[in-house]
Every structure is written in C-alpha cells, then in structure tokens.
C-alpha cells in the first residue's frame, strides 16, 4: 500500500486547499472527481471527501459508491462530505435555520480523542454551509460542537471514519493543520516522507523511464516553473533536452536578453527565438481576453512546431505547467469544480504537431516548485522571481494589443518592479505588475489639458495563487512610483492601485 491520500472532489472552491494542507505535512495527496473513482484504490492509505456547493438533500446530489472505502480505509468527510456520510447512513441532514458561514469557536470538545489531540474549547473554525446535521449517522459519536452547530465533528464506532462540518484546510481554522495531522498521521498511520529531495529523485527516475533516449523540446520563460522543469529534465536526460526561449513580444522590458544571459550559467542548451512580430500581428484587433489567450497559445504552439522541425527526431514537448494552472483551467482533475480561465499550457496539442507532452511539475503548487528548485541548488534570483503569466503583458493590456501599448506598459512595469527592488519590497510581494486600462483619463500637464492612459498597479501576497490579499505598500513608495510613471512614461497621466483580494477578484485583470 502506497503512502498517498485520495481527495474526492465534490466541487468545493476549497478542494485544492485540502491538497495543499496535506502536502504541508509532507504527505502526498491527489484530487480525483467524485464520479471517477480510481479502479485501484490500493495506492491510497486514506481518503478525504471535500465540501460542495450542492446539498445532500437535492435530487442530483453527488452520490458516489464508497463501499470499497467506508469502513475499509481511514475516511474524513469535510462539510458536504460529513453531511453525505450522515445523510446516506442513517442520519438526518436538514436546512439550517440560518446560513452557517464564517468564523466560529468550538464550545465542546470530547476528551481523550486522538482526532482532537491538542485542540481545545475555544479553538476557531471556519463554517461554510446552509444545511446542517440534525441527527448523526448510525454508530456515530459526537466529538465537537460550536454554539450554533451541535454536530460539528463526529466519528463512527468500529471504523476510522470521521466527519466535520467546518473547513480545516482554510487558514481561518486555527488548528486545522493539527486536526489533519491527527487524522492522517496518528490515526491513518501515514508517513511524512514526501519531501523536495524525494520528489526530485522519483521524478528524475520516472522521466528517464518515460522518455528514454528520445529528444525533448522545452519552452523556457525565465520564470520559476519552466526553469525548475528544465533542471529536472536536464538531470534526467542531459543533452537530449533542447530548450527554446520565445520572445512573444509581450515580455517585460529587456527580459528576452536578460533571461537568455541567466540561462548561460545553468548548463542548459538554450536557443532564443524572437517571434514578437508574429505574435503581435496575430493579435491585431483582438480585444476579448479569452480570444487573446487562445491566439497567444496557438502562435506559441506554431513557433514550437517550426522549431521542432529543426531538432531532428524530437518526440516530446515539455511544459512548466503546475497544479493551479490545471485547477483553474479544467478543474482539479476533470471533476466538477468551476472553470475560471483557460491557460496556454493546458489543453493538449493540435493534431498536426506530432510531439508528446511531458509536464514534470503538473502536480506541484508554486511554493513546492520553489522548494524543489532549492533542493537542486538553483539560484535564489531565479527561484525568487515573481510569477508572470504565460500570455505575458497580453492579458495586462485590457482591450486590443498594439506595439505602442506594449512599449508603454513595459516602461510602466519596469518602473514599478525596479522600485519594489530598490525599496526592499520585492521579496515581500508574491506577484506584482501593472495593467494598461482601455480608458483615456483627463489630466493637466503644464497649462495643457491631456487625455492619456490610466494604469493600475497590482501587488499581492499569497502562497500558491489560489487565494491572494493585496499588499499594503507604503504610501511614500506609491507616491514616488506614481510620479515616476507619469513624468517618465509618455502617454500615461493617471496611476491607481488595486486593493482587491482573491476571491472575489482574480490576480490578473483578464
């Protein structure tokens, strides 16, 4: 039996956070849709049921067959998962008198329970449900309550089955990580052995086995993801890896040259391809965000198709796709979670391109990618780089894209990012960038009235990009940056700062 955790996705917005919290315990977890259970469950030592926007009382409620799981493997139901285990096993779930959402505190905790070791009365938890468990399932023992929720936690006698009506995966549940550790380590007996070094060793071995002596083309971006993917592949197949860095015309100022220079010191075989005119020509007149993403993705593939013909017998295209890319694009694993946006690294290749895809990082979150890179002694400069979207400035220019707009935004972005570095703020920010808005703003310069562009600055703090809070940058820094942008960038006369958090806003504007 493998040392893995299976998370069944019922469509909760928090499902991916469950995986994050489990992995923080150095235990590997995988998300699968509730309606596509793996045929072979022997790889999993414990199972977690996620929350859901659905009600267990609804006619179309998600209803998987858990006969090979419940009572046979350690099982934890979270929110909908807990209500599911109650509703279909002799309990009673009914509408709550009031929607139970937000912070609450445990008012009762059953003593001498392994599940709640180290968690006492008063511990804060996060609720998010409109139904509630009125009667526990058969053989259940109540373990915890809040002021409004009597059956906040329970276990079933004779099984290692547990249910909780709050979310241990969100930071608002202060002892959530401890509760997951109690369940996975103390009760389910999983080993905490999933580390960056172990990931590198396993992944390199798998890549060697999968690729063999065949050649791989990898698109480098200068960012953390593609750089770490390149290092893993280089360890696995050496000079059979051919790296290509494409200038799509939407990079940051001077980034094409500076990134190529960086890679000279990493022992990678890298070729720079300036396709900026090709991308900008294809984007001409397109203003729809999804339309722009699809065009950038298509031309990106076309450029790689052209380059692949220059590498004799290339069989593979490697990509730095990471878990959040896949989660926000096609759900966590093809399951019921909502689609937010498309991503140019996700969705496969056109039929005419005969390259197979390899994605060494597809199951890692961003912070995990950085730890893997650090374990391979990658430079702090590369590992510390802020995330930058695959479509680049193309989704930071709202509306249609022109060379003039790109040039304006590159100058604005450079002033903002350089300023963060000079003020010692860069490493305190997870991601930062500027957006060129599709409006002309009235202004006064000298004695003349102007109608020029407005730009929005954005800086957020996050761990994995799934949630993000805006950064409270010093007023003095914002004032200096605004003045520098307006005085030095022709065509801009107004600067605003975005103070929206994710959710409900996304990090990018498009």
Image (tube, grey):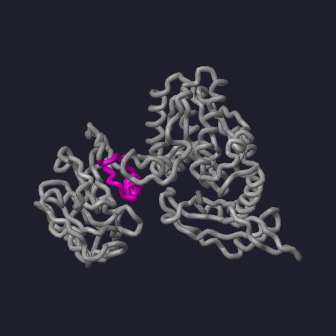
Q: Residue at x 80, y 63 (%)?
A: 491
Residue bounds of the magenta highlight = 8-34
Residue occupying the point 29% across, 76% down: 98
Looking at the figure, which quarter contains the N terminus? top left
Residue 4's quadrant in the figure? top left
Q: Position of residue 351 (x, y in %)?
A: 52, 29
Labels in figure, total: 0
Where 113 sits versus 1, above or below? below
Q: Is residue 497 magenta?
A: no
Residue 322 percent across, percent down from the top left: 50, 46
Image height check: is 489 above or below 261? below
- Picture quarter containing residue 510? bottom right
Q: Position of residue 227 (x, y in %)?
A: 60, 42
Q: Residue at x 67, y 56 (%)?
A: 397
Of residues 107 and 194, which is closer to you in this image?
107
User: Residue lying furthest right in this view?
Assistant: 447
Magenta-drawn stretch contains 31? yes
Q: Is residue 35 left or right of residue 277?
A: left
């Amino acid at each position: 039996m493998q040392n893995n955790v299976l998370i069944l996705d019922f469509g909760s917005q928090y499902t991916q956070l469950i995986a994050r919290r489990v992995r923080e315990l150095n235990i590997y977890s995988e998300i699968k849709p509730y309606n596509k259970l793996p045929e072979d469950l022997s790889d999993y030592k414990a199972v977690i049921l996620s929350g859901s926007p659905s009600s267990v009382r609804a006619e179309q409620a998600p209803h998987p067959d858990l006969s090979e799981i419940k009572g046979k493997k350690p099982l934890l139901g979270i929110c909908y998962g807990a209500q599911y285990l109650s509703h279909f096993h002799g309990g009673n779930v009914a509408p709550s008198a009031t929607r139970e959402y937000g912070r609450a505190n445990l008012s009762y905790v059953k003593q001498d329970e392994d599940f709640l070791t180290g968690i006492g009365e008063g511990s804060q938890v996060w609720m998010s449900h409109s139904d509630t468990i009125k009667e526990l399932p058969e053989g259940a023992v109540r373990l915890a309550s809040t002021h409004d929720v009597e059956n906040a936690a329970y276990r079933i006698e004779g099984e290692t089955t547990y249910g909780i009506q709050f979310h241990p995966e969100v930071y608002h549940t202060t002892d959530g990580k401890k509760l997951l550790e109690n369940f996975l380590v103390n009760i389910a007996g999983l080993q905490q052995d999933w580390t960056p070094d172990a990931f590198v060793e396993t992944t390199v071995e798998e890549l060697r086995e999968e690729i063999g002596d065949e050649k791989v083309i990898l698109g480098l971006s200068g960012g953390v993801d593609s750089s770490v993917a390149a290092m893993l592949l280089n360890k696995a197949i050496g000079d059979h890896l051919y790296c290509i860095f494409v200038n799509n015309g939407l990079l940051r100022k001077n980034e094409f040259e500076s990134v190529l220079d960086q890679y000279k010191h990493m022992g990678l075989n890298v070729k720079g391809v300036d396709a900026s005119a090709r991308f900008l020509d294809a984007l001409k007149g397109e203003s729809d965000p999804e339309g722009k993403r699809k065009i950038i993705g298509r031309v990106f593939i076309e450029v790689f198709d052209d380059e692949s013909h220059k590498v004799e017998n290339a069989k593979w295209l490697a990509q730095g796709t990471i878990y959040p890319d896949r989660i926000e694009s096609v759900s966590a694993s093809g399951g019921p979670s909502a689609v937010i946006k498309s991503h140019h690294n996700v969705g496969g290749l056109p039929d005419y391109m005969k390259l197979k895809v390899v994605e060494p990082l597809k199951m890692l979150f961003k912070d995990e990618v950085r730890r893997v890179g650090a374990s391979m002694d990658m430079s702090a400069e590369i590992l510390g780089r802020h995330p930058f979207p695959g479509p680049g400035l193309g989704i930071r220019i709202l509306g249609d894209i022109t060379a003039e707009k790109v040039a304006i935004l590159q100058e604005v972005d450079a002033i903002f990012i350089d300023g963060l570095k000079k003020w010692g703020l860069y490493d305190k920010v997870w991601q930062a960038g500027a957006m060129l808005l599709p409006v002309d703003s009235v202004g006064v310069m000298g004695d003349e009235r102007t109608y020029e562009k407005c730009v929005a600055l954005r800086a957020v703090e996050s761990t994995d990009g799934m949630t993000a809070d805006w950064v409270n940058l010093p007023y003095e820094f914002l004032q200096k940056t605004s003045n520098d942008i307006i005085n030095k960038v022709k065509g801009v006369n107004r600067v605003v700062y975005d103070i929206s958090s994710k959710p409900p806003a996304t990090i990018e504007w498009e």
